[in-house]
Image (spheres, coloured by chain):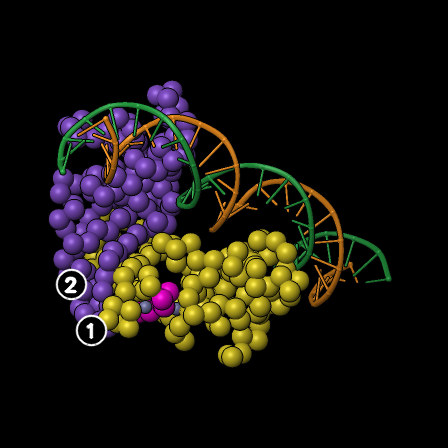
Chain colours: A yellow, B purple, C orange, D green
Amino acid sequence: MTAHADLTRNQSLVLDRLEKAEAPLSAYAILDQLREEGLRAPLQVYRALDKLLDMGLAHRLESLNAFVACARPNCHASGLIAFAICEKCGQVAEFSDDIVHERLHDWAHREGFVVSRTTMEIRGSCRACAA
Amino acid sequence: MTAHADLTRNQSLVLDRLEKAEAPLSAYAILDQLREEGLRAPLQVYRALDKLLDMGLAHRLESLNAFVACARPNCHASGLIAFAICEKCGQVAEFSDDIVHERLHDWAHREGFVVSRTTMEIRGSCRACAA
DNA sequence: ATCGCGGCGTAATGTCGTAACATAAGCGTC
DNA sequence: GACGCTTATGTTACGACATTACGCCGCGAT
Ligand SMILES: [Zn+2]
Ligand SMILES: [Zn+2]
Ligand SMILES: [Zn+2]
Ligand SMILES: [Zn+2]
């Protein structure tokens, strides 16, 4: 359990669930798990998630409409994050690739496109599940 | 307007709206536009969209929960498609990059990850809107 | 003919996300 | 302390996106 000292109660609860989960969780799945802690409305979860995303402690998987805890210490620093999502077991691998980042950056520069954020998600089967 | 001879009525109607649109459309936005043509339920649109996606005539933008007509003749052939989405005007550019494709393929190969599909979406401002 | 299959129509429901409004706690200033 | 400001919180209601379940029809294959 990492520190995350400056988190509020709801933020801690949500992050804790994400860290304990073995697969991405939807906001409503998190909410269901936290009803016994007193949470009752989706917005309480979404607000916590927003902050966690801002701090880089969690990520949203757009192709799943779900969330995961960040798997790497300082991934806020790496320019671009990619996710490989196993459709069988739900496991998510998080990685980054400088060359890919550079190629996309080059494309954007050529086109005059100002990037605000990028999502890259690979769906498939992890090594264990592909066997 | 290209031929698409083998499409059913609903599929043609949906594709037609996507091609005429200047920005991605949600399934419900398409439905609203097609009420006068007799469509009444979301499922009619989603079924048509499923087929169009299969045929490579349309794409789903995961980060928007919306759909666009394919902008390139044979993009089914290119290994991986990336989208640059302008958050101001909604314009979508569709492109592919062999190096990026190769890098991701290499990563997957190293990890033993079997890819079924990949989504890559860049959000930001197009040249015109960034000015 | 009749079987299977793909497309279609409809209703109901499920899942994801936000708007609007009210409350409470912390904190610097006067 | 009283005031105003900011941030987190709680609650209700609603909007937006997507699917399940069921049945009908048309058409080609057996
Ligand atoms: Zn991360
Ligand atoms: Zn797996
Ligand atoms: Zn395309
Ligand atoms: Zn633009």
Disc 2 residue lies near ligand 3 with CB under 8 A = no
| Mark 1–mark 2 distance (CA, rounded to whole Å) | 12 Å
Quarter of the image containing the C terminus of chain A? bottom left
Q: Which of A13 and B123 is in front in this view?
A: A13
Q: Position of residue D27 (x, y in %)?
A: 19, 26
Labelled disc at residue B102: 2
Name the residue located 29 percent from the left edge and 59 percent from the top edge: A123
Quadrant location of residue A46?
A: bottom right
Q: Residue B65 falls in which quadrant of the image?
A: top left
Mark 1, ligand 2, within 8 Å: the answer is no
Looking at the picture, tell me which residue is in the foreground, B53 or D6.
Answer: B53
**Residue A96 at what x, y percent from top left?**
29, 68
Q: In this view, does B106 lie above or below A122?
A: below
Q: Is mark 2 on a helix, strand or loop?
A: helix
Q: In the picture provided, is C5 more to the left or to the right than B5? A: right
In depth, the one of B50 and A80 nearer the eye is: B50
User: In the picture shown, does residue A96 fall above or below D5?
Assistant: below
Residue at x 51% of width, y 79% of height:
A1
Let me know if marks 1 and 2 both belong to one chain.
yes
Dot 1 falls on which chain? B
Residues shaded magenta: A89-95
x 39%, y 55%: residue: A64
On the image, the x and y values in percent for residue A42 come to 57, 53
Task: State the image quarter where residue D13 is shown.
Answer: top right
Query: Disc 1 marks which amino acid?
Result: Arg
Identity of the amino acid at label 2? Glu
Which quadrant of the picture is home to ligand 2? bottom left
Q: Name the residue under label 1.
A: B110
Q: Which residue is drawn at 43% across and 70% down?
A: A22
